[in-house]
Amino acid sequence: MRPAGSTAAPVTPGPATQAPPSVRRRLAAMVYESVLLFGVVVAAGLVYGVLTGQRHALQGAAGLQLTLFVVIGLYFVWFWMHGGQTLAMKTWQLRLVAADGSSPGAGRAIARYLAAWIWILPALAGVGLAGLHGSAPVSAALAANIAVVALLARLHPSRQFLHDLLCGTRIVASKPPPRGRA
């Protein structure tokens, strides 16, 4: 409530003060993001294969992996810098903002992309160091790693993921723009 005679406008919660969307909702957006990224990866792989004359999956594998790492990074960084939403984030009505509620800049977006590999790299490193091969150990390690990272978000008071805490970013709910009358 405002004091009597006050002319100040009521304070509405901004992105920096909003409660974060549920962990489940953010994980669902990540699953949808992976479906969309499949198309990006296939297109980039096709272009890479044509440009390099790649005829076998193991030929030029390191170059292809580096190319895909960069292409996926460009996808995320561009969308985060231009509106704070990837296509999946728009669908799930989520937005990336800096901790103060402002739009993330290039440095922060790049740092977040690199830090987000915490969802995958520890599992892959563990499987590699253990000398395990095959889809079962990799899948189990990835599932365990994802569960740990998601659980850490559930335990943290602000419910943000570790890579967001490290980079000074946060995911907030984004309401769709009001529809005009037709």
Image (cartoon, rainbow, N blue to C red):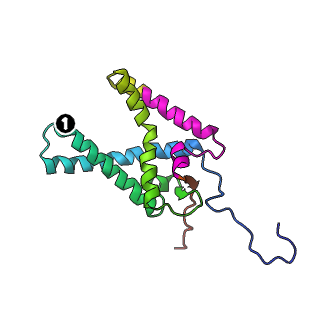
Picture coordinates of residue 12 (x, y %)?
70, 65
Magenta segment boundaries in residue numbering = 141-167
| Count of picture labels | 1
Q: Main secondary structure of the magenta part?
A: helix
Rendering coords of residue 157 (x, y %): 66, 44
Check the picture and name the quadrant holding the N terminus.
bottom right
Q: Is residue 164 magenta?
A: yes
- Amino acid type at image mark 1: Ala
The residue that appears at 35% across and 26% down in the rendered structure is: 128
Q: In the rendered image of this protein, does residue 125 appear above or below residue 21?
A: above
Residue 20 lies within the magenta run: no
Above/below status of 52 relative to 10: above
The quadrant where residue 117 appears: top left
Left or right: 132 as drawn, with respect to 151:
left
Q: Secondary structure at mark 1?
A: loop
79 up-or-down from 68: above or below = below
